[in-house]
């Protein structure tokens, strides 16, 4: 088993719904509102980096002082992170299936074994966000690439009703890259530094 978050998507390439592809951001609003309700800061945060209800500070404190990742917080973070990815899969045109607030087969996320946090460093959570800065810079470049491929995929779906495999692959790989960063620097489920490659 890997020491990184592994994400897989059930990508739909053919027989795409052109009408919903045209207005995904509007259609996904109710589920996004549900997700946002987990964190009041999402509504009032002026910062570009938003956690969407993920519990972070208690994890840092528990790891720092007790050396344990609380299992109930891990379960909550896994559920919220799965919802974020289901919403993203819908917005990023990877599927026409409307994002469920319950776990579904559209997105599968495999986490490294945390075993109560005993395998995690006690002090590293204080600096992981700083160590991840090079990853954010590379991820920003990848995000631009992914956005270009998303626009091409959107145009392809609107005009032909299909999504090219190359567009889907690019969007999936960029998402997997960012999920690895989140696993390392935000959710704190691994101490292994993520790779810079897609």
Image: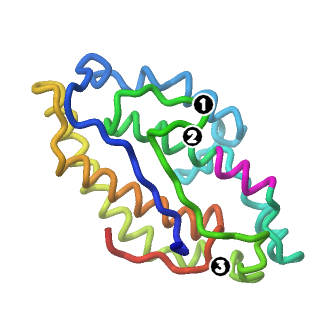
Q: Few, some or many C-alpha atoms within 10 Å of disc 2 (few <14, some 14-19, many ≥20)?
A: many
Q: Position of residue 73 (x, y in %)?
A: 78, 54
CB within 8 Å, label 1 to label 2: yes
Label 1 neighbourhood size at 10 Å, few (<14), some (14-19), many (20+)?
A: some
Q: Position of residue 176 (x, y in %)?
A: 41, 59
- Disc 3 packing (10 Å; few <14; some 14–19; many ≥20): few
Report which residue position mark 2 lands on.
83
Contact (Cβ within 8 Å) of mark 3 with mark 1: no
Precedes in sequence: disc 2 or disc 3: 2
Res 126 quadrant in image: bottom right
Indicate how the structure is coloured in the image: rainbow
Q: Earlier in the sequence, mark 3 or mark 1?
A: 1
Extent of the magenta region = 72-79
Residue extending farthest top: 19
Secondary structure found at label 1: loop
Q: Which residue is mark 1?
A: 101
Distance between the Cα atoms at labels 2 and 3? 27 Å
The residue depicted at 38 percent of the width and 65 percent of the height is 139
In front: label 2 or label 3: 2
Label 3, secondary structure: give it: loop
Question: Is residue 119 found inside the magenta-colored segment of the image?
Answer: no
Rendered position, 1 above or below 171? below
Disc number at residue 195? none
The location of residue 136, given as percent across then percent down, is 44, 68
Would you name the residue on which mark 3 appears?
127
């Amino acid at each position: 088993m890997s020491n990184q978050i592994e994400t897989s998507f059930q990508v739909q390439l053919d027989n795409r719904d052109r009408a919903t592809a045209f207005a995904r951001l509007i259609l996904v609003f109710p589920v996004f509102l549900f997700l946002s309700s987990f964190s009041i800061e999402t509504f009032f945060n002026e910062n570009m980096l938003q956690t969407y209800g993920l519990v972070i500070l208690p994890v840092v404190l528990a790891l720092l002082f007790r050396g344990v990742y609380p299992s109930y917080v891990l379960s909550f973070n896994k559920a919220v992170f799965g919802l974020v990815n289901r919403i993203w899969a819908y917005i990023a045109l990877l599927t026409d299936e409307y994002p469920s607030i319950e776990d579904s087969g559209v997105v599968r996320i495999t986490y490294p074994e945390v075993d109560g946090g005993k395998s995690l460093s006690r002090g590293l959570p204080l600096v992981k966000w700083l160590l991840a800065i090079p990853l954010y810079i590379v991820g920003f470049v990848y995000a631009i690439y992914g956005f270009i491929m998303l626009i091409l995929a959107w145009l392809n779906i609107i005009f032909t009703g299909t999504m090219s495999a190359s567009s889907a692959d690019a969007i999936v790989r960029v998402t997997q890259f960012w999920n690895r960063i989140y696993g390392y620097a935000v959710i704190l489920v691994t101490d292994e530094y993520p790779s810079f490659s897609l």
